[in-house]
Image (cartoon, rainbow, N blue to C red):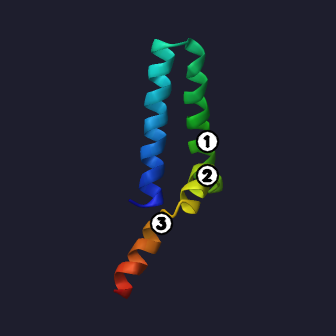
Amino acid sequence: MSIERSIFAFAGFMVLLSLALTALVHHNFVWLTVFVGANLFQSAFTGFCPAAMIMKKLGIKSEAEIERAKQQS
């Protein structure tokens, strides 16, 4: 799985988790949803995504890196 798809999966999971926590634990967990949405919005314009930086350090490759590896083999 590429970093790009991993970010979509992680963001979706965090939104669903925060909604569940909001419904089941405390209404202030809605702020986690706000944070995830704001982070996605700003990363669309700036390209800065802390989650992508962490995933890259964990060894997850971008779609471009995966495609280059396919072409070289």
The amino acid type found where label 3 is placed reads Ser
Q: Is residue 15 above or below residue 53?
A: above
The residue where tag 1 is placed is 39
Q: Is residue 42 left or right of residue 9?
A: right
Classify mark 1: helix, strand or loop.
helix
Quarter of the picture holding the C terminus:
bottom left
Upstream in the sequence, badge 1 or badge 3? 1
The front one of 16 and 57 is 57
Residue 49 is labelled as: 2
Residue 71 location (% of width, % of height): 36, 84
* Residue at mark 1 to residue at mark 3: CA–CA distance: 19 Å
Mark 2 Cα shell of 10 Å, populated few (<14), some (14-19), many (≥20) = some
The amino acid type found where label 1 is placed reads Asn
Whether residues under marks 2 and 1 lie with C-beta atoms below 8 angstroms apart, the answer is: yes
What is the total number of numbered labels drawn onto the structure image?
3
Upstream in the sequence, badge 2 or badge 3? 2
Q: Is residue 53 above or below residue 10?
A: below
- Residue at image x 63%, y 50%? 50
Upstream in the sequence, badge 2 or badge 1? 1
- Residue at image x 46%, y 73%? 65
Quarter of the picture holding the N terminus:
bottom left
Classify mark 3: helix, strand or loop.
loop
Residue 62 is labelled as: 3
The amino acid type found where label 2 is placed reads Cys
* Residue at mark 2 to residue at mark 1: CA–CA distance: 7 Å
